[in-house]
Amino acid sequence: MSDATSDPRVNPRKVREGIVVSDKMNSTLVVAVNERVSHARYGKTVQRTKKLYVHDEKNEAKVGDKVRVQETRPLSKLKRWRLTEVVERAR
């Protein structure tokens, strides 16, 4: 049975894709993640942007890159995400 809830080894951590906004800090990125949600009352689709602080051990991502990040344990006061891969390099 391949049910996601019964297997203890399944990783339930969130994965997001976003654009790198800042890489000024050492081994830390700021990534803007856009989310499309339906407005509670009017039903119109609204874009919400969230800034995530991401751990980038090798300083490989640069501003403008599209990256995939994964939730992790708290690494500092604000950092709760880590870089999994650079999806697309900035032109």
Image: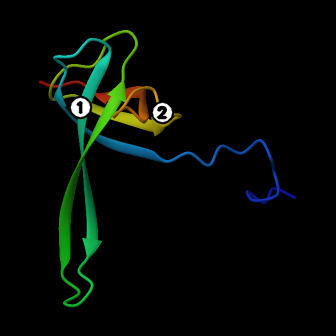
- CB atoms at circles 1 and 2 under 8 Å apart? no
Q: Quadrant of residue 6?
A: bottom right
Choose between 77 and 39: the one closer to the eye.
Answer: 77
State the mark number for residue 74: 2
Name the quarter where the N terminus is drawn: bottom right
The amino acid on which the numbered mark 2 sits, given as a three-letter code, is Pro
Task: Provide the residue designation for mark 1.
Answer: 30
Q: Residue furthest right?
A: 1
Q: Quadrant of residue 37?
A: bottom left
The amino acid on which the numbered mark 1 sits, given as a three-letter code, is Val
- Residue 27, relative to residue 76: is it above or below? above
Name the quarter where the C terminus is drawn: top left
In x, y percent, where is residue 65?
22, 28
Which residue is at 26% across, 65% downward?
Answer: 36
Of tags 1 and 2, the one toward the viewer is 2
Give the mark nearer the N terminus: 1 vs 2. Answer: 1
Label 2's element? Answer: loop
